Image (tube, rainbow, N blue to C red):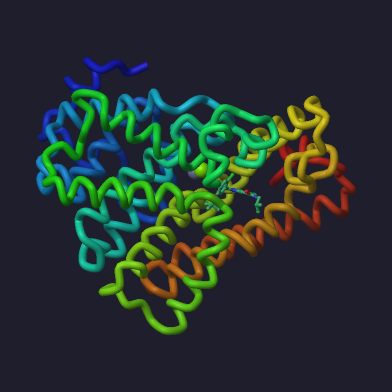
């Protein structure tokens, strides 16, 4: 485990170059899950640096290091919703900011809000979904179930706790106005990662594609930020098949553990959480077609350079269709045969 001293020693400004990570680090093809764990904090700091955010917002290096160490500590270790997921989500935010030249469409404030929301968006996730919080009468449900988006409100609250920890407030040198606006944006962007909210804004996003985006309109800027955030949250689907397949294994490991717990509590789990009823390839095709593909189609429609990302999502859907046929032909009953996945 890399501790504070190692991280601080190893980050003089001069050492912050992309060469430390990979020549393709800032390309859409690069899979961030391949980066070795003890370089991830340094890579997070590099991403702020490379987008010019450290100098723009006068972020002291020691503050950014402490912030990142606290964020990493703020994640638990469920199969999927852990710091590796947060890191890969932040990396995609960096790719979008850099390759879509978002800073010519959005303000630096909106870019730093997207990057920071990405690394914080699943803080303290327990590996169970919103419905489980409510059905199990969890503490989080008692806190937030009246407003909905129970987990996402908690992830945001955890991010605020870290910013309020002395020596960790990376926004401390902003003006009062900038500070308030940035926190509002981080909250909006994290709350956009609730599946229910995402499904609700899809029609509005389709409308923007038909009518053209008007970035002088604050609501449309916030819709674009929500779209970018869900594209980042799902970005494992935009990489080579290995990544997509491995992510499915992690997701269903988490989903089926929740289903097992629900059965022990005497509740009937959704099919997607039930290892005895779920057919992973079919569920993944549904998820890709109804939740993931629209995100990348819309973003590619708004930013043509993003077309290569949409193509890779299409390729992965094609792979799932081939796997589904294979599953059916072998009559494989359930998910433990995921290892069978070619
Ligand atoms: C590979 C992959 N398969 C998934 C299959 C099903 C579901 C799911 O929630 N189905 C139940 C709904 C339809 C009632 C989510 C999946 N998923 C996510 C994910 C995305 C999330 O939020 C946004 C980004 C806003 C969609 C929030 C939580 C999660 Cl786990 N990330 N990767 C995946
Ligand atoms: Mg989440
Ligand atoms: Zn997430």
Q: Quadrant of the N terminus?
A: top left
**Which residue is situated farthest in the bottom direction here?**
211
**Quadrant assignment, res 97:** bottom left
Q: Is residue 270 above or below residue 300?
A: above
**Image side of residue 108 versus residue 155, left or right:** left
Q: Is residue 265 above or below residue 52?
A: above
Q: Residue at x 35, y 30 (%)?
A: 71
Percent across and percent down for residue 224 are 38, 65
Q: Is residue 219 above or below residue 342?
A: below
Q: Residue at x 40, y 35 (%)?
A: 157
**Image side of residue 175 versus residue 97, left or right:** left
**Which residue is situated farthest in the front direction here?**
146
Q: Nearer the viewer, residue 19 or 248?
A: 248
Q: Nearer the viewer, residue 274 or 281?
A: 274
Percent across and percent down for residue 299 are 43, 68
**Quadrant assignment, res 13:** top left
Percent across and percent down for residue 203 are 54, 72
**Quadrant assignment, res 29:** bottom left
- How many numbered callouts? 0
Percent across and percent down for residue 51 are 20, 50
Q: Nearer the viewer, residue 5 or 117?
A: 117
Q: Residue at x 36, y 70 (%)?
A: 220
Q: Residue at x 80, y 53 (%)?
A: 326
Q: Nearer the viewer, residue 264 or 323?
A: 264
């Amino acid at each position: 485990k890399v501790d504070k001293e190692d991280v601080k020693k190893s980050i003089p400004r001069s050492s912050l170059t992309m060469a430390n990570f990979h020549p393709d680090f800032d390309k859409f093809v690069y899979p961030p899950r391949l980066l070795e764990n003890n370089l991830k904090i340094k890579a997070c700091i590099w991403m702020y640096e490379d987008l010019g955010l450290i100098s723009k917002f006068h972020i002291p290096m020691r503050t950014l290091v402490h912030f990142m160490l606290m964020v990493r500590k703020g994640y638990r270790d469920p199969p999927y919703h852990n710091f590796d997921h947060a890191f890969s989500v932040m990396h995609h935010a960096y790719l979008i900011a850099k390759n879509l030249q978002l800073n010519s469409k959005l303000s630096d404030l909106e870019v730093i809000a997207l990057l920071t929301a990405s690394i914080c968006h699943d803080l303290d996730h327990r590996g169970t979904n919103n419905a489980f919080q409510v059905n199990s009468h969890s503490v989080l449900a008692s806190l937030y179930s009246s407003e909905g988006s129970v987990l996402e409100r908690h992830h945001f609250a955890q991010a605020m706790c870290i910013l309020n920890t002395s020596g960790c407030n990376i926004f401390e040198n902003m003006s009062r106005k900038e500070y308030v606006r940035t926190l509002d944006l981080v909250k909006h962007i994290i709350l956009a990662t609730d599946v229910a909210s995402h499904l609700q804004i899809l029609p509005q996003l389709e409308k923007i594609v038909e009518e053209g985006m008007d970035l002088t309109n604050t609501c449309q800027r916030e819709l674009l930020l929500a779209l970018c955030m869900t594209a980042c949250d799902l970005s494992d689907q935009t990489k080579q098949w290995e990544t997509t397949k491995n992510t499915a294994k992690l997701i269903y490991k988490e989903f089926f553990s929740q289903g097992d717990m629900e059965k022990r509590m005497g509740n009937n789990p959704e099919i997607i959480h039930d290892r005895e009823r779920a057919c992973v390839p079919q569920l993944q095709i549904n998820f890709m077609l109804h939740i993931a593909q629209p995100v990348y189609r819309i973003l590619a429609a708004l930013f043509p350079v993003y077309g290569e990302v949409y193509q890779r999502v299409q390729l992965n859907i094609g792979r799932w269709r081939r796997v589904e046929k294979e599953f059916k032909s072998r009559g494989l009953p359930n998910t433990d045969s995921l290892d069978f996945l070619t």
